[in-house]
Amino acid sequence: MSVSKEQIREYCRIKYVENARSLGDTHVTIRSSDVSSVFQLEPNDPIVCEALWSNEFEYENYLFRVFNNCQRENGVSIMVYRILDIEDKVDGNN
């Protein structure tokens, strides 16, 4: 299955970020292996980390990158973001 970084970001925006935001969560955690399985990728396929640990994903979803272990080669990476207040993005206040 051929998948783009944009498809991965869109899936994670809907599945993880919007869900966490609607629940009032302050952080969202994404496991690369969970995303890889949805797109039928190998667990350690670097495209997942490349798509999610990017300025685009952070900016588009108004997140702050807190933690990642994408450099690991054993297959499972975990990315944690702090969910920022969306009103600040609209107002331009940081």
Image (cartoon, rainbow, N blue to C red):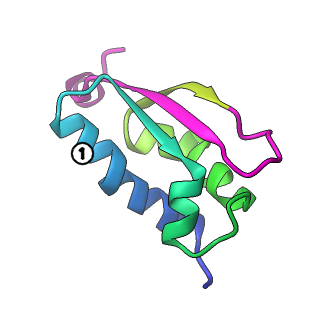
Q: Is residue 76 left or right of residue 11?
A: right
Q: Which residue is painted at 73% across and 52% down in the image?
A: 75
Q: Which residue is painted at 54% across and 46% down in the image?
A: 31
Q: Which residue is painted at 16% across and 39% down in the image?
A: 22
Q: Is residue 93 above or below residue 5?
A: above
Furthest residue in direction top, as rendered: 94
Badge 1 marks a residue whose secondary structure is helix
Q: Is residue 65 above or below residue 38?
A: above
Could you say where residue 63 lies in the image, as x and y percent from the top left?
A: 42, 31
Q: Is residue 41 left or right of residue 60?
A: right
Furthest residue in direction front, as rendered: 74
Q: Is residue 85 left or right of residue 72?
A: left
Q: Name the kind of residue labelled 1 in the image.
A: Asn
Q: In the rendered picture of this protein, how many numbered marks are placed on residues?
A: 1
33 or 16: nearer the viewer:
33
| Quarter the C terminus occupies | top left
| 22 falls in the magenta region | no
Instruction: Give residue 28's quadrant in the image.
Output: top left
Q: Which residue is mark 1?
A: 19
Could you say where residue 69 lies in the image, as x and y percent from the top left?
A: 70, 34
Q: Is residue 47 above or below residue 86?
A: below
Q: Which residue is painted at 49% across and 38% down in the image?
A: 58
Q: Is residue 42 left or right of residue 26?
A: right
Q: Which residues are magenta?
A: 69-94
Disc 1 packing (10 Å; few <14; some 14–19; many ≥20): some
Instruction: Give residue 55's quadrant in the image.
Output: top right
